[in-house]
């Protein structure tokens, strides 16, 4: 299904670029409830929720003080685009974004996959496995896993002054101390500003430009993915 095609494209793109940079970025568009305009930015793919591709949930991380965090609290609709320039493939994805932090956990009704998240046993046959919904400690562990996966420099970014605040002497001094590594803050100090965003996808437009093929994937009411080949 589309998840495995996307994962393979990520692997192929990183291989061609020799992991430089060692990550894949994509474009995320949200809706600014105040202005009514779409709001677009580049974010970094942080893998699949619970490190499990079968969830179909793409993740990235953000600072709670960022505009996109506030926008998603008011309107969780999103569109995202992965474009792989070296292998000539593109994915456009649409759905609902869910915030995951100390104060927010995805609603069970929003889980956009027929495969539940936490297996009750270790059977290798996924069709026969009995699943349960994530517990609070499992969400907490996921937040810790994603935070600990960040580089030291990335963790420091969550200690910076509030994004878009007016740059003044006090803020400049703090930025300077952070850049020089003398701000005196513990590595985990910025965790209070950290959040995961889970993209619960329900529509995918996959275009293989190299082979001139295009596919649409849609999630139906029974939470099953339907694939349709369409004209490119």
Image (cartoon, rainbow, N blue to C red):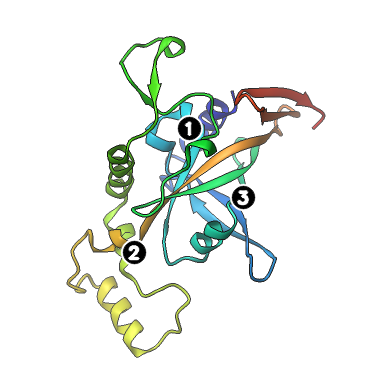
Q: Position of residue 51 (x, y in %)?
A: 38, 33
**Residue designated by label 3:** 78
Q: Dot 3: few (<14), some (14–19), or many (≥20) neighbours within 10 Å?
A: many
Q: Is residue 121 above or below residue 63?
A: above
Residue at (61, 56) in percent of width and height: 30
> Element under label 2?
helix
Q: Position of residue 115 (x, y in %)?
A: 49, 24
Q: Is residue 228 left or right of residue 135?
A: right
Q: Nearer the viewer, mark 1 or mark 2?
A: 2
Q: Earlier in the sequence, mark 1 or mark 2?
A: 1
Residue at (62, 24) in percent of width and height: 222
The picture quadrant where one finds residue 124 is top left
Residue at (17, 72) in percent of width and height: 184
Q: Does the image show residue 88? A: no
Q: Is residue 75 left or right of residue 167?
A: right
Disc assigned to residue 109: none
Q: Earlier in the sequence, mark 3 or mark 1?
A: 1
Q: Dot 2: few (<14), some (14–19), or many (≥20) neighbours within 10 Å?
A: many
Disc assigned to residue 11: 1
Q: Nearer the viewer, mark 3 or mark 1?
A: 3
Give the CA separation, mark 3 to mark 1. 24 Å
Q: Is residue 62 above or below residue 228?
A: below
Q: Position of residue 87 (x, y in %)?
A: 61, 35
Q: Position of residue 210 (x, y in %)?
A: 70, 31
């Amino acid at each position: 299904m589309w998840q495995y095609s996307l994962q393979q494209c990520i692997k192929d793109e990183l291989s061609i670029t020799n992991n430089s940079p060692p990550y894949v970025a994509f474009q995320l568009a949200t809706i600014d409830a105040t202005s009514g305009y779409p709001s677009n930015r580049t974010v970094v793919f942080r893998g699949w929720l619970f490190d499990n591709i079968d969830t179909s949930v793409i993740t990235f991380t953000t600072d709670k003080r960022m505009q996109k965090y506030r926008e998603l609290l008011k309107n969780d609709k999103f569109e995202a685009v992965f474009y792989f320039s070296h292998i000539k493939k593109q994915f456009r994805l649409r759905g609902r974004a869910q915030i995951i932090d100390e104060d927010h956990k995805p609603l069970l009704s929003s889980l956009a996959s027929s495969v539940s998240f936490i297996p009750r046993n270790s059977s290798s046959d996924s069709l026969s496995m009995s699943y349960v919904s994530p517990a609070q400690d499992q969400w907490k562990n996921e937040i810790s896993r994603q935070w600990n996966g960040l580089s030291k420099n990335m963790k420091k970014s969550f200690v910076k002054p509030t994004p878009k605040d007016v740059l003044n002497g006090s803020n400049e001094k703090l930025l300077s101390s952070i850049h020089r590594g003398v701000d005196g803050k513990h590595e985990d100090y910025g965790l209070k500003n950290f959040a995961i965003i889970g993209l619960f996808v329900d529509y995918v437009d996959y275009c293989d430009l190299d082979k001139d093929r295009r596919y649409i994937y849609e999630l139906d009411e029974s939470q099953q993915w339907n694939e349709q080949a369409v004209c490119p």
